[in-house]
Image (spheres, rainbow, N blue to C red):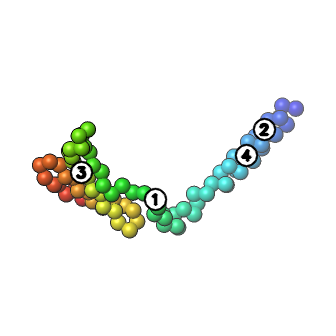
Amino acid sequence: MKTVQFLTRVSLFVLIGTSVLSCNNDEDSDDIPPVPETGYFVRTMKVTDGEDRLFFNITLEYDDNNRLVGETFVAKSGARKVG
């Protein structure tokens, strides 16, 4: 009787395990290139004090796939191009 219960539990575990693993949708993801996300991407950030004096300004540049390709950091002392 214990053998029947053991085999029943093992077969149920194997059935559930194979069902879960076979429903994975990552199998074909390597064939499809990622789609660029759409929406709002920050182009400019300004940091000021309470009296609206500018401390620094950051400008971000993106390519056609919405990847960051460069940024410009402007402080009171001048500009520095990164990227």
Label 2: few (<14), some (14–19) or many (≥20) C-alpha neighbours in 10 Å: few
The answer to which of marks 2 and 3 sits earlier in the sequence is 2
Q: Disc 4 residue type?
A: Ile
In front: 38, or 18?
38
Say the numbered circle drawn on residue 9: 2
Say the numbered circle drawn on residue 26: none
Cα gap from disc 4 to disc 2, whole angstroms: 11 Å
Q: Quadrant of the N terminus?
A: top right
Q: How far from the left and from the top, in percent, is residue 49?
A: 24, 40
- Circles 3 and 1 in contact, beta carbons < 8 Å: no
Task: Please name the residue that numbered disc 3 is placed on.
Answer: 57
> Is residue 51 shown left or right of residue 28?
left
Q: Is residue 75 above or below residue 38?
A: above
- Circles 4 and 1 in contact, beta carbons < 8 Å: no
Q: Disc 1 residue type?
A: Gly
Say the numbered circle drawn on residue 16: 4
Cα gap from disc 2 to disc 3, whole angstroms: 64 Å
In front: 10, or 64?
64
Residue at coordinates 33% horizontally, 57% vertically from top-left?
Answer: 43
Considering every residue shown, the one lying at the far top of the view is 2
Q: Which is closer to the viewer, label 1 or label 2?
A: 1
Secondary structure beneath label 2: helix
The answer to which of marks 1 and 2 sits earlier in the sequence is 2
Residue at coordinates 14% horizontally, 48% vertically from top-left?
Answer: 76
Q: Disc 2 residue type?
A: Arg
The answer to which of marks 4 and 2 sits earlier in the sequence is 2
Q: Which is closer to the viewer, label 4 or label 3?
A: 3
Secondary structure beneath label 3: strand
In front: 23, or 9?
23
